[in-house]
Amino acid sequence: MPELDSRRFYAELEAGTIRPVYWLSGENGWERDRAAARIKAAVKPDEFNFDSFYGDRDGGADIAQAASSAPVFAERRLVLVRRAGALKADGREAVSEYLKNPLESTCLVLVAGGGEGGGRKGPRGPSLSALAAQAGAAVEFEALRPQEAQKWAAARAGEMGAKLPPEAAETLVESSGADLSALENEIAKLAAYKDGAAITSEDVLQCLGYAREAEPFALSDAISAGDGARALRAIDAALAAGEEPVVLLAMMAKYAERMLRVKIMLSAGMEQGRIAAELGVKPYYAGRLAAEGKARSERSLFAALNRLLEADAALKSSSGSPAAVLKSAALAQHFLIE
């Protein structure tokens, strides 16, 4: 059977169609978990007809045995396997054998997290994801682009009784990323903090733990301006305010990665408005990245990202003080001193 998109998947559940096997994957962990919960709500298993496993902890033989068991005084049994892509070789083989002839009275849900295996063909035959798609359905939940995450955050805030205007939503996604689980946690805190009042960008930064004296975008602004001295001062100020070194490094990497993406999209003939939508930023910011990127080559930006990867390894290995590592990385980036 072909892979299902998320809309058709949810439409089938609403119509009462439950397939014997589901493979849920993709980078959008919040949506993967929501999909698994929706399947469970549709099956409505009692304690005698529900089994839960973890692919990195439990054996594939146990999973296959549970899935092969008939339901007890019920129409269906539900078997949920989280981190299914982490199954070991023997476990994958046992589950693969079950997938070749699954029971109609069992709903086997295999949830593979982002970065896990399972989607590639193995040396002994088709992958679990391919077999699951043939036996039932495979649904991939892709990570949202920043602009999509901002709309989602505003809508989710509304569901919680909070008001998250576009600028505050942009600040939230810009500061904490597009992971929906993390965003939901932050929105819940903001909703409780504001108690129905409109949330501002300043509220977002305060709830994220930024001190007033440590402007979170000072470092990226200094890099954007090509001002090495100001970048070094921003690093000192952020560290003094308690900011994590890895967060500062991520800010530098994000700027270089965005500039590189803009250059590549411009080279492909993409219009600036569409580029802004792809990046989830305002048009003026996309224009600024495009203007600043004219004097920098793709090669130099790749080199900058490689240097930041080296800095990340240095931070994790504790070789040198965090301040020294960060400052060295900032000054060594080609887009600062090119």
Image: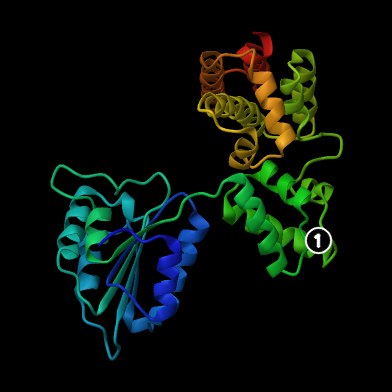
Quadrant for the N terminus, please.
bottom left
Q: Nearer the viewer, residue 47 or 197?
A: 197
Side of 51 relative to 305 (left or right): left
Which residue lies at the image location 27% right of the left edge and 60% below the top edge? 133
Which residue lies at the image location 62% right of the left edge and 42% below the top edge? 277
> What coloring was used for the rendering?
rainbow
Q: Is residue 7 visible?
A: yes
The secondary element bearing badge 1 is classed as helix
**Residue 285, image x and y in percent?**
72, 32
Q: Is residue 323 visible?
A: no
Q: Nearer the viewer, residue 74 or 209?
A: 74
Sort mark 1 into few (<14), some (14-19) or many (20+) by Cα contacts within 10 Å. some
Res. 44 image quadrant = bottom left
Q: Is residue 102 above or below residue 151?
A: below
Which residue lies at the image location 21% right of the left edge and 55% below the top edge? 91
- The amino acid type of the residue labelled 1 equals Tyr
Q: Nearer the viewer, residue 116 or 260?
A: 260
Side of 207 relative to 36 (left or right): right
Res. 138 image quadrant = bottom left
Label 1 sits on residue: 193
**Residue 103, image x and y in percent?**
20, 75
